[in-house]
Image (cartoon, rainbow, N blue to C red):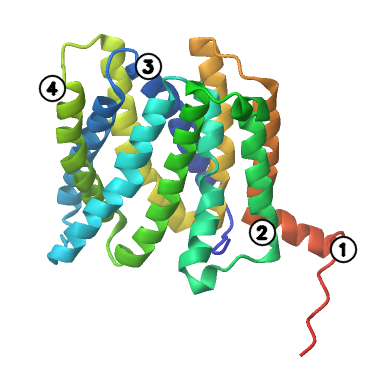
Amino acid sequence: MTDQMSLSSRTWAALLLLAVIWGASFLSIRVALDEIGPLTAVAHRTLWAMLVLWIVVAIRRLPLPRAPGIWGAFLVMGLLNNVIPFGLMAWGQLYVETGLTSILNAATAVFGVIAAALFFRDERLSLRKSIGVLLGFFGVATAIGLENIRSFDLRSLAQLAILAGTVSYALASVWARKTLSALSPQVAAAGMLTGSTIVTLPLALSVEGPMRFDLAPVTVLAIGYYAVIATAGAYLLYYYILARAGSGNLMLVTLLIPPVAILLGTVVRDEALNPNAYFGFAILALGLAVLDGRLWHRLRKTGRLIDPPPKRP
């Protein structure tokens, strides 16, 4: 990972806040799924978040893109970063605990490294990244449990759907770098959610019927939370931290989200995870720490890690 700046106390606070917001989003989505379908849940998420972000863009008077190709890129980005992963993970949460969903979601960083290595010459897999990726895969496999893979059922399929969502997130990061890097983050996020809403609204309508608004108060609160706070607000907070801490430090949020989601799932929904889920997360966290690079460089400085001998010409 590159671009690792120092973390001030204010930035640490923002990072922890982002972890709490995103960690709680898994619970709020699961609460909403008690009354609405997965596609409708996603449509609510993209629609209301889109409106909030366009209001932010209007207030800040940010310039809008005019090239038709950019709006096509928004549509693709919306599919890769919202429609596919949100839909797969929402469906997966019908059969997978909140905490385990957040653990599997942490694999996004692992697949992101692989996707970047495949598409960008300056992101090739080094020894450190390769070790981090292997640890990440081992951690995910441990969290799922080999017994679940052998006795394949609906729960196993749901876990694979969640992992497929993380692969889509990884491809979205590649697409964003190739097509949207010149735009302001707020406009890029609003445009992406617009592309998402164009797809999710008719899809939810055709599969699950019209959106209902006579919902239980707890469902309305859950939708409002994950759409307005955990999507629109979190995007703004994400880019605030990125500008002040860098992408390397920002990856720390990936390690902070699962404990929040696990705790909330246990307290609010009385969920109990299999011990292998915790063990798998520990291995995955180690892999993410290796990908982050600080642990690796610290070991090199202390002499506990010996670099391979240089190749002879």
Mark 1 secondary-structure assignment:
loop
Pick whichever of labels 1 and 4 is earlier in the sequence: 4
Which one is nearer the viewer's eye here, 169 or 294?
A: 169
Asked if marks 3 and 2 touch (Cβ < 8 Å), the reply is: no
Q: Residue furthest right?
A: 303
Q: Residue furthest bottom?
A: 313
Distance from disc 4 to disc 3, alpha carbons, whole Å, reads 20 Å
Residue 189 appears in the rendering: no
Which labelled disc corresponds to residue 303?
A: 1
Mark 3 secondary-structure assignment:
helix
Pick whichever of labels 1 and 3 is earlier in the sequence: 3
**Viewer-side label of 3, 2:** 2
What residue type is disc 1 on? Gly
What residue type is disc 3 on? Val
Residue at x 49% of width, y 58% of height: 115
Pick whichever of labels 2 and 1 is earlier in the sequence: 2
Q: In this view, does 176 lie to the left or right of 57?
A: right
| Res. 276 image quadrant | top right
What residue type is disc 4 on? Pro
Q: In this view, does 241 lie to the left or right of 198?
A: right
Place of residue 55 in the rendered image (x, y in percent of width and height, measured from the top left): 17, 43
Q: Which residue is identified by label 3?
A: 31
**Viewer-side label of 1, 3:** 3
Q: Quadrant of the C terminus?
A: bottom right
Q: Which residue is identified by label 2?
A: 130
Mark 2 secondary-structure assignment:
helix
Pick whichever of labels 2 and 4 is earlier in the sequence: 2
Q: Which residue is identified by label 4?
A: 210
